[in-house]
Amino acid sequence: MTSSDVAATVRSLMPQVIADLEELIAIPSVAFPGYPEEPVHRMAERTLALFREAGFAEARLMDVPTGYPPIYGEIPGPPGAPTVVLYAHYDVQPAPESQGWTSDPWTPTRKADGRIYGRGAADDKSGLATHLGMLRAFDGKPPVTLRLILEGMEETESNLEAFVEANPDLFQCDLFVICDMGNVRVGEPVLTTALRGDVSCTVTVRTLEHPLHSGVFGGAAPDAMMALARLLTSLHDDNGDVAVDGVTQGAWEGADLSEDDFRSMADTLPGISLPGTGSVTDRLWAKPSVNAIGIDTTSIAESSNVIHPVASAKISMRIVPGSDPEQELAALVRHLETHAPWGAQVEVTPVKAAPPYRVRTDGPGYAAAREAMAEAFGAPVGEAASGGSIPLLQTLEDASPGTEFVLWGPEDMAQTRIHASDESVDPDEIERMIVAQVLLLQRLAAS
Ligand SMILES: [Zn+2]
């Protein structure tokens, strides 16, 4: 197929691609504990059926000790052709009403802007749709050996890393194509070259043996909630930069985003200033960030004139590409243990140390992806990083040392709102990504 044939073929396939995507969005495949299991199993079965139909005739649900099954499949290519592993995930984030959805998250809804709204429309059912469209463009007979791995628990306690470690032979390949990313803006192609890691812990602050009357004791008795607030504040300096000793800092070499662009992507409220110093992309992609993502204390409804003896928070710190997660987590723990006011007792429990990742950009796979993407989009390809983490990448690299990665997809940063309310995807971006994936495999086969 010439590239104009590819574009025409993919265009003709789009009604089916979108129909499949909409069917999959309607299945609430939330793999978090406490959510119904039936829809996740239904999603696994339906995804499996679609990929079988599209070319992975032997694909199957794999046995795992816990959780929902990954889907694995293989299509042998011509002798001597390279091997490519396709990755996406079929589970999604929850979509609680409290997030403020303006349409039902489980009813795919095409709005006036042409985008399709629904939980998972982008993350990562658009990745499934992209892979399906590419397979159909080749009529199920790709010019390389293809392996497929679709994860069912990416958004929660992933079981895929253990699966990869137990079955490294399934993951031997020349290139991993991770379709769970996106351009900064629709239609402007970028390849993701770095991801921050994520470390987290819980911190509990104690100041008293028991609650006290705030009138009788307030003023001299230390309040655990206020002590926790001061401890949290100490994680930033006055500029809003992370002020944790020993945490690795970095700088982003590639293109920047203006503060205005960022404001419109993040929908910050009027009058809000952006914390931190350096360029916006430094702050998003190359410097650490720290946030309090949960807090346990007395609710307003249950409050009375009482000083609280104990308060807890969960802290997440995004760490920079190239840093060591255990060391970064240790620095965070040390800070929390040593910065509480009034001699408050502090107990820190580490929760997670997920590594950052830096993509190799000097190999033939990356070069082929760059060319394919430029042709599909008709525009030069930039580089971006992602503030999000995919610990799986390091596990895959360990299973297949030296293998290259391509990280891309239809989840544009500007409008997609993954994990949030009104998640959406641009169908034209899916179409361009299918074309890019087809052209990539053609280039790999020819090289
Ligand atoms: Zn995802």
Image (cartoon, rainbow, N blue to C red):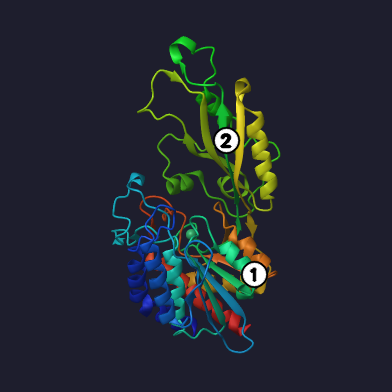
Image mark for residue 306: none
Q: Amino acid at mark 2?
A: Val
Is residue 26 rendered to the left or right of residue 164?
Answer: left
Q: Quadrant of residue 382?
A: bottom right
Between 430 and 279, the one lying in front of the other is: 430
Between 384 and 171, the one lying in front of the other is: 171
How far apart are labels 2 and 1 at the CA level? 38 Å
Q: Is residue 249 visible?
A: no
**Label 2 crowd bin: few (<14), some (14–19), many (20+), radius 10 Å:** many
Give the SS element for disc 2: strand
Q: Amino acid at mark 1?
A: Glu
| x 55%, y 64%: residue | 160
Give the SS element for disc 1: strand
Residue 38 vs 61, above or below: the answer is above
Q: Quadrant of the C terminus?
A: bottom right
Between 117 and 300, the one lying in front of the other is: 300
| x 34%, y 44%: residue | 98
- Which residue carries the number 1 mark? 404
In the image, residue 185 lies at what x, y percent? 46, 58
Is residue 153 rendered to the left or right of residue 305?
Answer: right
- Which residue carries the number 2 mark? 203
Of the image marks 2 and 1, the number of the one nearer the N terminus: 2
